[in-house]
Amino acid sequence: MDFLLLLAVFMDVNRNVAAYTNPTNSKVDEFLGTADWRIRWGKEQLQGVEFSEFLVREYTEKMKALSFIPPQSYDMKRVRSDDRNLPLYYLALFSRNERAYEFWNQVLKYGTEQRSFFS
Protein backbone atom coordinates (compact mmCIF):
# COMPACT_ATOMS: atom_id res chain seq x y z
CA MET A 1 0.00 0.00 0.00
CA ASP A 2 1.27 3.47 -0.89
CA PHE A 3 0.37 6.74 0.77
CA LEU A 4 0.29 10.13 -0.93
CA LEU A 5 0.00 12.56 1.97
CA LEU A 6 -0.64 16.24 2.28
CA LEU A 7 1.65 17.42 5.08
CA ALA A 8 0.25 20.81 6.07
CA VAL A 9 3.32 22.00 7.94
CA PHE A 10 3.82 25.58 6.86
CA MET A 11 1.12 28.21 7.36
CA ASP A 12 -0.38 27.20 10.68
CA VAL A 13 2.75 25.55 12.07
CA ASN A 14 5.03 28.50 11.34
CA ARG A 15 2.58 30.95 12.88
CA ASN A 16 1.98 28.89 16.01
CA VAL A 17 5.32 27.32 16.95
CA ALA A 18 5.00 28.53 20.55
CA ALA A 19 1.54 27.00 20.87
CA TYR A 20 2.52 23.64 19.38
CA THR A 21 5.73 23.36 21.43
CA ASN A 22 3.96 24.22 24.68
CA PRO A 23 4.16 21.14 26.94
CA THR A 24 0.39 21.29 27.55
CA ASN A 25 -0.39 21.08 23.81
CA SER A 26 -0.69 17.49 22.52
CA LYS A 27 -1.42 18.14 18.81
CA VAL A 28 2.11 17.29 17.64
CA ASP A 29 2.20 14.32 20.05
CA GLU A 30 -0.89 12.98 18.30
CA PHE A 31 0.51 13.71 14.82
CA LEU A 32 3.78 11.90 15.55
CA GLY A 33 2.39 9.28 17.91
CA THR A 34 4.86 10.18 20.67
CA ALA A 35 5.70 12.94 23.12
CA ASP A 36 9.49 12.54 23.07
CA TRP A 37 9.94 14.78 20.03
CA ARG A 38 10.39 17.89 22.22
CA ILE A 39 13.87 16.78 23.28
CA ARG A 40 15.00 16.46 19.67
CA TRP A 41 13.28 19.72 18.74
CA GLY A 42 15.19 21.59 21.46
CA LYS A 43 18.50 20.46 19.95
CA GLU A 44 17.48 21.17 16.36
CA GLN A 45 16.03 24.56 17.21
CA LEU A 46 19.44 25.60 18.54
CA GLN A 47 20.89 24.66 15.14
CA GLY A 48 18.43 26.95 13.31
CA VAL A 49 16.14 24.25 11.94
CA GLU A 50 12.62 25.43 11.09
CA PHE A 51 9.84 23.71 13.01
CA SER A 52 8.02 22.75 9.79
CA GLU A 53 11.09 20.97 8.42
CA PHE A 54 11.64 19.26 11.77
CA LEU A 55 8.07 17.91 11.70
CA VAL A 56 8.49 16.55 8.18
CA ARG A 57 11.68 14.73 9.14
CA GLU A 58 10.10 13.34 12.31
CA TYR A 59 7.05 12.11 10.40
CA THR A 60 9.32 10.54 7.77
CA GLU A 61 11.21 8.69 10.50
CA LYS A 62 7.92 7.35 11.88
CA MET A 63 6.96 6.04 8.43
CA LYS A 64 10.43 4.52 8.05
CA ALA A 65 9.86 2.63 11.33
CA LEU A 66 6.78 1.13 9.64
CA SER A 67 9.03 -0.18 6.81
CA PHE A 68 8.24 2.58 4.32
CA ILE A 69 11.11 3.80 2.17
CA PRO A 70 11.82 7.29 3.46
CA PRO A 71 11.64 10.02 0.81
CA GLN A 72 13.99 12.98 0.94
CA SER A 73 12.46 16.44 1.29
CA TYR A 74 13.45 17.18 -2.33
CA ASP A 75 11.30 14.18 -3.36
CA MET A 76 8.29 15.91 -1.85
CA LYS A 77 6.28 18.44 -3.82
CA ARG A 78 6.20 21.80 -2.04
CA VAL A 79 2.98 23.65 -2.89
CA ARG A 80 2.98 27.44 -2.60
CA SER A 81 0.32 30.14 -2.38
CA ASP A 82 -0.76 32.19 -5.37
CA ASP A 83 -0.41 35.71 -4.04
CA ARG A 84 2.84 35.79 -2.06
CA ASN A 85 4.43 32.49 -3.16
CA LEU A 86 4.57 31.30 0.45
CA PRO A 87 4.88 27.57 1.14
CA LEU A 88 1.58 25.94 2.16
CA TYR A 89 2.21 22.20 2.35
CA TYR A 90 4.10 19.21 1.00
CA LEU A 91 2.69 16.38 -1.06
CA ALA A 92 4.72 13.35 -0.04
CA LEU A 93 4.72 9.77 -1.24
CA PHE A 94 5.42 6.95 1.21
CA SER A 95 5.82 3.47 -0.24
CA ARG A 96 7.51 0.18 0.53
CA ASN A 97 8.34 -0.34 -3.13
CA GLU A 98 10.98 1.54 -5.15
CA ARG A 99 8.77 1.29 -8.25
CA ALA A 100 6.28 3.72 -6.71
CA TYR A 101 9.08 6.30 -6.38
CA GLU A 102 9.97 5.83 -10.04
CA PHE A 103 6.40 6.82 -10.94
CA TRP A 104 6.43 9.68 -8.41
CA ASN A 105 9.67 11.06 -9.86
CA GLN A 106 8.05 11.10 -13.29
CA VAL A 107 5.13 13.06 -11.84
CA LEU A 108 7.53 15.56 -10.28
CA LYS A 109 9.61 15.78 -13.44
CA TYR A 110 6.69 16.53 -15.74
CA GLY A 111 4.40 18.31 -13.31
CA THR A 112 3.69 21.98 -13.78
CA GLU A 113 3.62 24.78 -11.24
CA GLN A 114 -0.16 25.16 -11.53
CA ARG A 115 -1.13 28.28 -9.61
CA SER A 116 -4.92 28.15 -9.83
CA PHE A 117 -7.78 26.10 -11.18
CA PHE A 118 -8.73 28.61 -13.87
CA SER A 119 -5.50 29.69 -15.55
Image (spheres, rainbow, N blue to C red):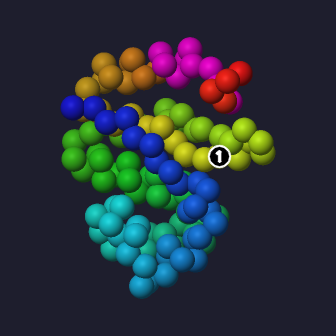
Is 109 on the left-hand or right-hand side of 102? right
Q: Amino acid at mark 1?
A: Pro
Quarter of the figure that contains the C terminus? top right
Residue 39 appears in the picture as rendered: no
Looking at the picture, how far across and down is residue 88, in whole percent? 60, 47
Instruction: Decide if residue 54 is on the left or right side of residue 11.
Output: left
Q: Residue at x 39, y 17 (%)?
A: 103
State which region is magenta. 106-115
Q: Say left or right for 26 vs 116.
A: left
Confirm whether the magenta stretch covers residue 3: no
49 over 18 or under it: above or below: above
- Near-viewer residue (51 or 48): 51
The outermost residue toward the bottom is 24
The quarter of the displayed image where residue 37 is located: bottom left
Where on the picture, by quarter, is residue 1? top left
Residue designated by label 1 = 87
Q: Residue at x 30, y 19 (%)?
A: 99
Residue 85 position, x and y percent, is 74, 42
Relative placement, left or right, of 96 versus 29 is: left
Q: How many marks?
A: 1
Along the line of sight, the residue nearer the viewer: 31 or 54: 31
